[in-house]
Amino acid sequence: MEIIISNSSGVPIYEQIKEQIKTEILSGVLKPGENLPSIRSLAKDLRCSVITTKNAYEELEKEGYIKTVPAKGSYIADINIELIREEQLKNIERFVENAVFLAKRNGVSKKELTEIINILYEEDEK
Amino acid sequence: MKGFIKKDILMMRSNLKILLVLFVLYIVMDFQGNSSLSFFLPVCSVVSMLSTFSYDDYNHWTSYAVTLPNGRRNVVKSKYITTFILLFLMSLCVGVFSSIIYVTKHYAINFSFIFENLFGSIVGALFVLDFMYPMIFKMGIEKARIAIFVGVFSIIILGGILIKYVDVSALSFLFSFFHGYGGILIFIIMMIFLSFLSYQISMLFYRKKEF
Amino acid sequence: MKYALEVKGLGKKYDDFELKDIHFSLPTGMILGFIGENGAGKTTTIKAILNMIQLDSGHIKIFGCDIKKETELAKEEIGVVLDDMFFPEILTPKDINVIMKDIYQNWDQTLFYQYINDFHLPLKQAIKTLSKGMRKKLEIATALSHHPKLLILDEPTAGLDPIARSEVIDLFRDFIQEKDCSILLSSHITTDLEHIADYIIFINEGTMLLSKTCDALLEEYGIVKCKEKEFKQIDKKDKVRFRKNRYEYEILIENKKEFKKKYPSSIIDKITLEDLMIFMLKGEVEK
């Protein structure tokens, strides 16, 4: 598991932790049933406060990505990644639908639209 | 509590050299004059004990000690017990050396003379210390030192006035009263009572003291 | 939730200073940091918790026990570092071990020597020969060596260089790995606290100005920079404090999200505890 915390990004640290663990779960790096480090050891390794990691885990649990057993620790919940992926794809489709609709109405060609998507995609990866 | 006593004793280690030099000096003086060694015990025990208080205050050990288990009680208790230990050790040394000096001087031994001298100096030391401790615990060593100085000074002046205007020989019955083993017993009881009283007063002050 | 420390309505009056209604609780397993200027009342609060001063009002509970009734009960379980209060300086670290063995039932000699070794402290040199940083490390080693459950630390990083400070902070992180171990610490080096404290209490002139989780403070508060025209358009109640520079206004705001909704074109900078302290103490309140 890899987590990179940026102190200057302006995104709250607990959210950075949450999102990165989520990404690792969805990309299959973290597998269902796998143990997560305790909130204390994670806080120590990330050099943040215990309450921050606690918040991140609590949110992840609320969203169903992880399960916590008192006195034992947290592990990745037995979620169906395919299902989540499908749902997310549907979400994306909805947004793209809007984009295509706007493009067509304003005379933006398919090529121009894919260009925009390409640029945005690459920008994010930088 | 043992820890607190150990601390005081470990601190006195740094005075040990000076004490030894003084001890030798007093022995030399004792050979020449008469029983100077009996002054060693009250002077050096008082100085040693006061120096432990000074070190304690200088690094705010007294404040730190309050945060340790049973801190307040142990600070007071340990000072009194350290005092007794110190007086005991010093009287052993003084007793042994006075005997040796007496024997080399007189080719005989007079235990009651040595004992009375020693006893007198222990009583003197204990009296001063029992008097000082409550003041130190109340106001800290710096202020207490001034108070003690004023106290001792006024006693000397009062004594001077007393000797000048009062017929001292009239008081001699007092001295005869304290003479002999009965007198020693009375002194012992008095000293125990005084130490107990001093301890209780110190404790009373220290229990409420703020740091 | 179990609490390592509960403080309620703490009050103490001196001739020239008054501590008023200090109240907070420290859940077990957490770190609480005091911030504030020198003389704001951090040390006085700590002294009250350690029963070094008599309270005028209020209650303090350590591990659920009232410290007035059961003064000595908790002390075995507390490790203390106080600013400038320690062993007489003619003693050596080795002496401290000899003494402390008889003071704490749980004194761990091996652990103490381990710290001495890790910190590269001389064992047989008098404390007075040690540098300020070394002394502080010795104090911290002493406070940790009887396996306390609660650390109470007044300026534990004062006088340490950045490397030593990070070493010490890491030590506190190790300490907190045990679920039932908690820390209360004060510091005016706020960056130390930012990376370790779960809760922050900001004390000024004897009263509490702020008491929140550190995350909430850093997320909710922010700084807005703007020109005079924009400054006038912002509601008075949205400006917690402000500072006027020659070329711009800087405004401390307490709810970034709401502010962004209300004034979408504003640029909000993130805040540090230091900014927060400076704004709260030096910034102006709009009348």
Image (cartoon, grey):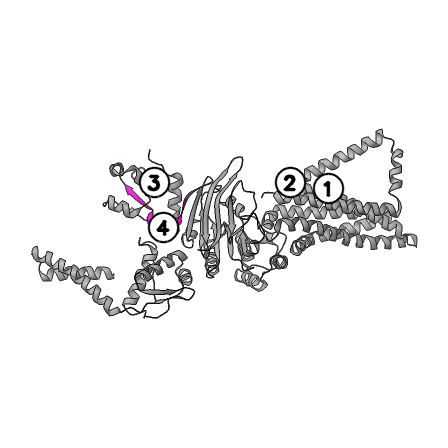
CA separation in Å, label 2 and label 1: 14 Å
Q: Nearer the viewer, residue C51 or A9?
A: C51
Q: Residue furthest right?
A: B107
Let me know if marks 2 and 1 both belong to one chain.
yes
Position in image of residue B120 (x %, y %)? 82, 46
Magenta segment range?
C210-228
Instruction: Say whether disc 2 or disc 1 marks the residue closer to the N-terminus.
Output: 1
Residue identified by numbered label 4 = C216
- In the visual, does B176 lie left or right of A33? right
Q: Is residue C98 above or below residue A30?
A: above
Label 1 and label 3: CA atoms lie apart by: 59 Å
Q: Amino acid at mark 1?
A: Phe
SS assignment at label 4: helix
- Name the disc covering residue B139, or none: 2
Q: Which chain is home to disc 4? A: C
Q: Amino acid at mark 2?
A: Met
Chain of the residue displaying label 3: C
Amino acid type for the residue under numbered disc 3: Val
Residue position marked by numbered label 3 in the rendering: C240
Under circle 3, the secondary element is loop
Residue A6: in sight, yes or no?
no
